[in-house]
Amino acid sequence: MTDSALDQVAMASECRAFARHLTDAEPTEYVMRCYERLLLSAHLPEPIASALIERALLAAGRSGGLMLRIADAYACVFRPRSALRRRLILLVAILENSPSSASYMNSGDEGSFVAVGLRMIVSTATSVLCAMAGVVIFGPAHVVSAILPPARSVNGPAA
């Protein structure tokens, strides 16, 4: 498999993991093409992109599931301009404007005041727990990143 084909596979895998995190659904071909085309706009300058914390957050994010949720919660609080957050925000914008997911992304929770309130409390508690887990998992890499010089790039999808 060529490097270009490998990059395509890695980018598609990343897009699928992020879309499942954001919408609980697989992305359409349209969403994947838009993500691939616009991914360059989410890149960071090389010295920042090659920091250990950036590589750790992106690698955890690409794995999907709980690790993506933890990495996202940590990055939201401690690295809001990270490559992971930039890519997730890019995908949110694409999903909000995609015919297949626009209604899901642009509609709010429905139900009684109590039901919506309970879902909000559970969601907030889960986010706080994920951020705390992120401190344990990514905190050391963040500290090391501040001390050590950058190592290599994470800008490409297959990094």
Image (spheres, helix red, strand yellow):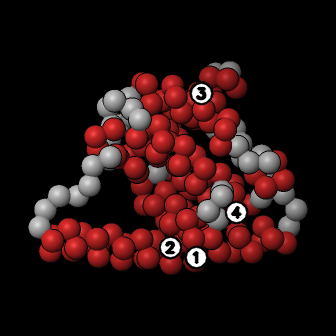
Quarter that holds the C terminus: top right
Q: Amino acid at mark 3?
A: Arg
Give the percent coordinates (x, y) of residue 34: 52, 28
Q: Secondary structure at mark 2?
A: helix
Determine which residue is flagged by label 2. Answer: 131
- What label does residue 37 carry, if any? 3
Residue type at mark 1? Val
Q: Amino acid at mark 2?
A: Ala
Closer to us: 92 or 107: 107
Pick whichever of labels 1 and 4 is earlier in the sequence.
Answer: 4
Residue 33 in the image: x percent, y percent?
A: 51, 25
In front: label 2 or label 3: 3
Q: Are marks 1 and 2 in contact (CB under 8 Å)?
A: yes
Q: CA distance from mark 1 to mark 2?
A: 6 Å
Q: Amino acid at mark 4?
A: Ile
Marks 1 and 4, Cα distance to the nearest angstrom? 12 Å
Q: Secondary structure at mark 4?
A: helix
Mark nearer the N terminus (2 vs 3): 3
| Above or below for 51 versus 156 | below
Kindly check if marks 2 and 3 are in contact, taking CB atoms under 8 A apart as contact.
no
Comparing marks 3 and 4, which lies closer to the viewer?
3
Q: Nearer the viewer, residue 41 or 145?
A: 41
- Mark 1 — residue? 135
* Residue 88 shows in the view: yes
Work out whether residue 140 or residue 101 is closer to the camera in this orientation and state it: 101
Left/right placement of residue 90 relative to residue 47 reads left
Q: Mark 1 or mark 3, which is nearer to you?
A: 3
